[in-house]
Amino acid sequence: MTANTLYIDQDRGFQRLNPLTKLVISLFLIILALVLPCMWAGYIVFLLAVVPLALWGGILRPLWSALWKIVLPFAISMFVIQGLFWTGGTPVVALGPFSLKAEGLIFATRITGRLLAIMGSFLLVSLGTAPDDLMISLEQRGVPNSITYIILSTIQLVPGLQARSEKIRDAQRARGLETEGNIIQRTRSMLPLVEPLVLGSIIDVDERAIALEARGFSREGDKTFYRTVEDRRWEQTLRWVLAVSALFLILGRILWPFIGRFLGGG
Amino acid sequence: MIDLENVAYAYPQATEPALRGITLHVPDGQFLAVVGGNRAGKSTLSYVLSGFIPHHFKGTYRGKIEVAGMDLTQASLGEIAGVVGLVFSNPFNQISGARFTVEEEVAFGLENMGVPSSEMPGRVAKALEMTGLSEMARRSPYALSGGQQQRLALASMLVMQPQLLVLDEPTSQLDPAAKIEVFEVLDRLATEGGMTVVLIEHELEWIGDFADRVIVMHKGRIVNDGDPREVLADEALIEMGVGNTAYTIAARQAREEGLIAGDQALPVTLSQAVDYFEGSLDRR
Amino acid sequence: MERLKKDFTTITFALIVVALAINIVVGTIVFQTKIPFVYLDQIGTVLVGLVAGPWAGLLTGVLTNLLWGLLGNPGYVPYAPIAGVIGLMAGWFGSMGWYKSWWKWLLGGLITGLVAALLSAPITAYLYGGVTGAGTDLLTGMFRATGSSIMEAALGQGLITDLIDKTVSFFVVWLIIKALPTTLLSRFPRSENVLEASDLDLDSVLDQ
């Protein structure tokens, strides 16, 4: 398994779930976090669903470690910017000439919770699913092999390219080119990277395409599978249940104002 | 197996043709080697034999191109894939990237061809065994050495059981040890027989060992065609940029300096050279 | 529909892989060297749109952001449709021949930047509370203090960066195409966007 995938392979129940199930669960949780009207919706979804699932898969620590790094910059910006500069807001805490507005703080709290839930759900998929298993499952469901080829091949290509770029940049850093200087100098220091990395890779596309053709890539007709990914009956049922529920939730959210008016007025 | 008649071709944006009228007939099961200097048209020939000219490279062409009874200009690349295999020099670019393990990478072609799943494990195992990669089956293709990757490319083609296998300078980007790894696989192919092979190579010593026949290309034409020992010993090859093997040069020198009498054919391989020199020693 | 099939050849798929990898690697480098006002994470997308058509460009853009998600940066995923639009527009401008005159091509970049900013603002406003976690959020603060809505502020903040970034990206793609061998370019489905085709007349040359 190449180093670049996030997938943490453990023999746990969560990992053993079919990749499509994990995908559907994740999407369901995202929809839940977006659709529930309560301010704490995100936190609820995160604590009651994302965390337990992560625990089940033994990936809670890496998930949290990745998650807070992603969410923190947004959270800080939101609390500061929307807190301080909420148009016509009700001041709550005074900070010198400025004041934090209640509406801004409420807003920031709500959105931060949602981000935790959404990004957390996403990380559940990327940390808990082997990409090739996911792609094979999709192919078994009819996704064209060209799409799955693109994703898997890119995942494998990136580390090598990144390593080569690191080598070039290390050489430049040793010469002090990169970290110093103004914008122009720093931009110029990046140019020697472009040629071997970018042009070389594009020129290789020709031979890579030939190799694909030689392996029958463009052949029309049904493809068969060397290995398949197991899909248990109860998982398929679960996926249907979640998909239908998600639909109801979305419809409910859209129609909620009308339902409310109907109930209130009738 | 191969029937080319008067094939001419020019790449797009080109100012001159790369092939100027090639006529070539290759019977089933023959191991044909192709030599020539730079720009002689060898790679172009390999693409013609595998259908990439004209389908991939476009450009303008003329003449009849038939392999295994199939008109390659009419068949699609997908149809040709099962019949003609192609291995070229860059090992890295031949890894599809579509799979995470060596054995799945080898099976990739079979999946595309719709081969029944039950047949796959056996064919994959055999291809890995022929190329000496059985122990690497679960490793990532990107973790392999250059020689191993090139053997993987070979395995990926052999597993599809093509009728014609074309190899365009398969060892030119490999270090000497890796070259030997690949030649050993080709040796096995040559001795087993059955498959028609076209090998484009610069390593003349090896060609002498396995080829049934050699053709020489120069400036888009075939300028010589025949038995390896005759064709490769030709001094004219040196001017064309192909060269002669060390054995040939040594033997020619020895003859010119009168150290060896007689008009025995010059050797092109090690074993021929040994016979040549031993033979003349006996006569003295 | 026929055009679609012709755009998505094997070489297109192979190109998309490399384009995606370039997007990710160059985007990472730019992020780490903290060059302001640019992201340069859609260069591959613009390239694919130009030489393989708008739909291939669309696919490349969408997959770029999805891949960031798979590789550990889910923050970019919601912007996938916008990345798709960037590829789409690069393809449209390419098929209108805009690549062939430098000022039209850069104008294309500018317009794409504008559209990208317009389309990103709602997503930034709705999902990310109107901020991006970067220094430009101070601009957002300014807009908000003077009475703009969250979305208007998000738009204002994104506009400058997107305009510059997309124009520079288009320019970089222009440089890349100029540096690539014409034989390679001739093999892409929309090679007419960047080349004048010239095929040799064999009959006259070989005069049999």
Image (cartoon, rainbow, N blue to C red):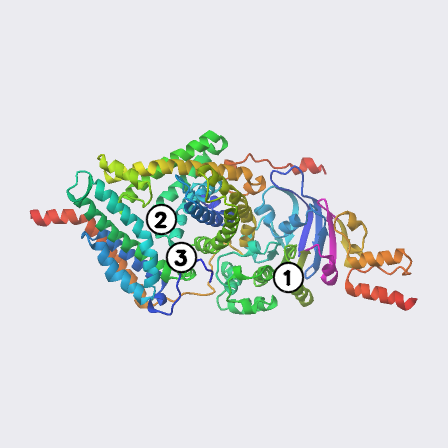
* Kind of residue indicated by mark 3: Gly
Which residue type carries mark 2?
A: Tyr
The numbered mark at residue C48 is none
Which span of residues is magenta-colored?
B200-222
Instruction: Compare residues A94 and B134 and report the one nearer the observer.
Output: A94
**Residue C99: x %, y % from top left:** 48, 34
Circle 2 residue:
C76
The answer, for residue A124, to whether it is visible in the render is: no
Residue B42 image point, x, y percent: 68, 49
In three-dimensional space, the C-alpha distance between marks 3 and 1, rounded to whole angstroms, equals 40 Å
Mark whose residue sits in front, 3 or 1 = 1
Task: Judge by depth and name the residue closer to the eye, C19 or A218.
Answer: C19
In the displayed orientation, state which residue is furthest to the right.
B284
**Relative side of B134 to A142, left or right:** right
Q: Mark 3 — on which chain does it sit? A: A
Residue B194 image offset from top left, x and y in percent: 66, 65
Quarter of the picture containing the C terminus of chain B is bottom right
Q: Which mark is residue A142?
A: 3
Residue B164 figure quarter: bottom right
